[in-house]
Image (cartoon, rainbow, N blue to C red):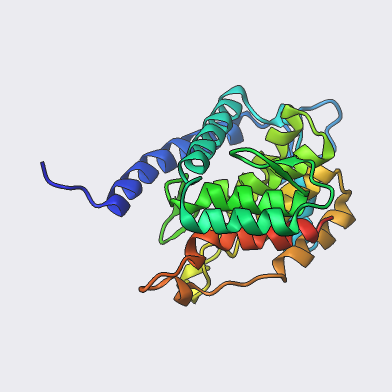
Amino acid sequence: MAEVDRRTCFKGIAALAASTLAAEAARADEARVAPLGSGQVGAPQTPSPITTGPSQTQGMARFAVRTRYEDLTAERRQRLKIALLDALACAIAALEASPIQAWLAQTKAFGGSDARCTLIGGGQANVVYAGSYNAGLVRYLDFMDSYFAGAELCHPSDNTGGVLSACDDAGRSGKEFLTALAVAYQVEATLTGAAGFMAHGFDLTTQLTFSLAAGLAKTLGLDEDQTTSAIGICASSGVPLLVVRTTPISQWKGLLPAQLTLGGIQGPS
């Protein structure tokens, strides 16, 4: 049997998923009774698109603040849980990798103060280093979920480690965790489809700086102005370039989301 190229396989899977998501989006638009700001009293409301607002950043903040657990359909909650289990499986599979072991040593060395957040695989660290380490675990093997939007792509589960640890630190419920993770997923996927990051030489993790900030702000219960500031801080903390991902590839490729999560959690906090 001929060997199938991994990227070709992923593209095929993504195309199938994209067609499904497009159909769901069309049905959701048809079912929408009244968007936010329509003025219709008593009509069901859904969050405005993330691009709606006086600025792009304010639009993302508005979306994050207004999104509720009830806005997630039963099917989408289920898919989000499946994505979470997939991310955890990827993390567990990466536990013995030598760069991850080095990252764990750094986490223990610098994340010991106020160490109350769980590390995947065992142990605890403060929220900054726990989120960073957990993000590195999910990303390292490069088997996590992928979202394809034409020539652009992203890995939405890059948000998982940071949002999980922030929820752990803040004592959030499972519903609150899923809501914050859904916000991060939506922001990253929408940005990926709306802007040509890779086409203009930026790394595919650039949009993670926006989405992670939105998810973390949701976790922390920030208001719209605070969330706008948090997204601005995080987005300016790292603008990785795609050229660094070209052959030969360094360990930076697998640990960049961990690096961005390290700075991202410090931003909204």
Nearer the observer, 247 or 123: 123
Nearer the observer, 97 or 197: 97
In the displayed structure image, the side of residue 267 where residue 132 appears, left or right: left
Residue 112 placement (x, y as % from top left):
78, 52
Nearer the observer, 226 or 128: 128
* View extreme (left): residue: 1
Q: Which residue: 52% across, 43% down?
A: 91
In the displayed structure image, the side of residue 178 where residue 222 appears, left or right: right
Report the quarter where the C terminus lies: bottom right
Identify whether 155 is placed above or below 31.
below
In the displayed structure image, the side of residue 143 where residue 171 appears, left or right: right
Q: Which residue: 24% across, 52% down?
A: 5
* View extreme (top): residue: 74
Residue 197 placement (x, y as % from top left):
53, 68
* Residue 70 appears in the figure: yes
Q: Which residue: 89% across, 56% down?
A: 225
Residue 134 placement (x, y as % from top left):
62, 47
Quadrant hosting residue 67: top right
Count how many numbered circles sit on residues in the image.
0
Residue 81 placement (x, y as % from top left):
57, 30
Q: Which residue: 62% across, 44% down?
A: 160
Quadrant hosting residue 150: bottom left
Report the quarter where the N terminus lies: top left
* Residue 212 appears in the figure: no
Quadrant hosting residue 174: top right
